[in-house]
Amino acid sequence: MTTVCTVVTYQFAGYELNMTAWQWVCVVLLLILNFSAISITGTYASATSADSRTANSKAARIAYPLGLLLTVYLSVVFLAQPIGALVGAALMLIDLCVIIIYAVKVSRMAQADYFENVKIKKSRKAHNNYVSYTTPKSQFGIVFRHELRYLLTLKTVLLNFVFLCFCPAILVFIIKYYTEYMYLNYAVLLTALMMPRTPTNLIAYSIGGEKVYKTGESLLATPLSVRSLFLAKSMVPVLVSAIMLIASSLLTLVGANIIGSVFESGTIYMYTADQLVLLFPGGIMSCVMMVFITGVLTVNMKTSRQGLYLSNVLGIIFVAPPLAIIYLTKNMLMWSIVYFVILLLCNFICIKSISDKISRPQIMSKL
Amino acid sequence: MRKIVFEEVKKTFGEVTAINVLNLSISEGEVYALLGHNGAGKTTTLRLLLGLLGPDKGSITVFGNTPTKNGNAVRGMCGVLSEDVGLYEPLTVYDNLMYYADIYGMNRIESNRRIDELLCRFDLFEKKKLIVKGFSTGMKKKVALIRAMLHRPRILLLDEPTNGLDPVSTADLRSMLSELAKEQGTTIIMTTHNLEEVQKMCDKISIFRHGKNIFTHSISSLKDSSHYMEHGQFSLEKLYMDIETKGAENT
């Protein structure tokens, strides 16, 4: 779909792709092979996992590298024929190997495998990760520490987040490669699109997870205040998003400056003030907003998953204001600050109304 | 004597009446069983007691506290084993228990000692550092039971406590609950369908039907009466079946 959209956009924009017939055949063939490889991996992962999240994590281990390799191929397909052909052939071979391996695995599965599908690694590491034994003072602290400890067990999710941190940098470098210009605005836009998805995914494990794994009732039956519980659970995704924001922005900046110093005789790149406002205060505030949207949706929808799907779609909204600020306004800095202040006010109102109104019977009725 | 009292309590969910004018009085130190068919309102009663749900009508007091007003005071003195064990599966047994020990404000030395003591008692000490995912239903139930007892609560609310437990663990739990009630004066309220267990463990029973308490009696007085004997012994099952088929008044 991405490739088709890219091609259509190129045509509409009046560019020519300059691809030969065999290059088109290779692209189509690779797309089919890639799609088949990811599908069959997903099928096997679904059959051998306890729930859809575990299946998703397992499938992602194969899907992400394959997706990355495809992106690499789409980038080099325009190059001189031997390199493009070589990379394409190597990738087809990898895809074919994956398809064959998983086809064999699926065909060997007996019906009983579907009922004995949970493979558990009884590792002692989870406990060893437990670092500090100091008693937390507040209820907020207790829940926050617990959420962090829980987060450390979600290794695949964290790995995916690390991978996401490289995306803005990769986008900027690809654009630089094709256009000769270093547009940091693209990194800002991709970050604005990408970041709200991080808290959405994490909320699935914290607030949504309490509903899915039925841990909520036991927790509500303790003297823990609902306000502390909700705020602590919300702040962990925000913290992770903030770390990711810093990491991805630094990676982009460091990469841009390395390219600048090596290939552009010492050109130095730095984010402008408006980009910084959009990235950090704006980015963090949009993540906080997304936490509330996802939290409310996962608790209120019939199933948590519906809430997650909806909030994932709603996350796209957060790219619109930065897009408008970058391309439609003349005073970017002023509008970036206005955007930040609006988000800040919205979040304040959300925190106030949620912490004032939220009650145990209300949550119980949604669990 | 301190009591847990439900007076004329009514609770509806939409058009469904879950609790219909419920009257209940439970004294401190009693082992009390709430019996009844599925959907009779047993779990809702426990949730009302904890302040997780608010009553539409009537009043509830738990040792002088109203759950909807002094909820944290009530919940602080309760240990709860809910229908779903509610454990964090990717975490270890220890992490699960320590989370709740922290919530109940236990200090680290005390909570470590208590966790070890209860894990030994339930034969789970060697599993202390293992993640919960992959445990059998019975083992998860044991961990959830330990979590409920961790802070030595004055009231223990157990929703189907022996469901999924092996006979040895059930017997262990029975002796432990009796000990808690007799030596420490812990009030134990349980919901169960296992009548044999109730007969062995409980002091008093209430049978619920469509949200109403239709029969309340102490086990000792029932045992003394000559009715409902089977093979020369009192049979709670016979009594329960009679109430379910004929109604409490006829019985």
Image: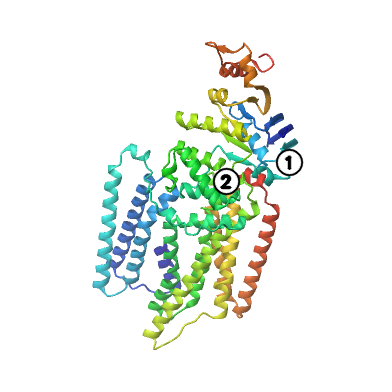
Q: Which residue is mark 2?
A: A216
- Under tag 2, what secondary structure? helix
The kind of residue tagged 2 is: Gly
- Under tag 1, what secondary structure? loop
Q: Which mark is residue A294?
A: none
Q: Position of residue A311 (x, y in %)?
A: 55, 56
Number of marks drawn: 2
The kind of residue tagged 1 is: Thr
Q: Position of residue B124 (x, y in %)?
A: 44, 41
Disc 1 chain ID: B
Mark closer to the observer (1, 2): 1
A229 is higher (above) or lower (below) than A190? above
Instruction: Assess whether mark 2 and mark 1 are in contact (beta carbons under 8 angstroms).
Output: no
List the single residue furthest toward the front: B183
Q: Position of residue A183 (x, y in %)?
A: 47, 78
The answer to whether any part of residue B1 appears in the image is yes
B105 is higher (above) or lower (below) than A85? above
A77 is higher (above) or lower (below) than A199? below
At horizontal 46% and vertical 77% (from top left) the residue drawn is: A253
The answer to whether any part of residue B85 appears in the image is no
Disc 2 chain ID: A
Q: Quadrant of residue A14?
A: bottom left
Residues behind callouts 1 and 2 on a single chain:
no
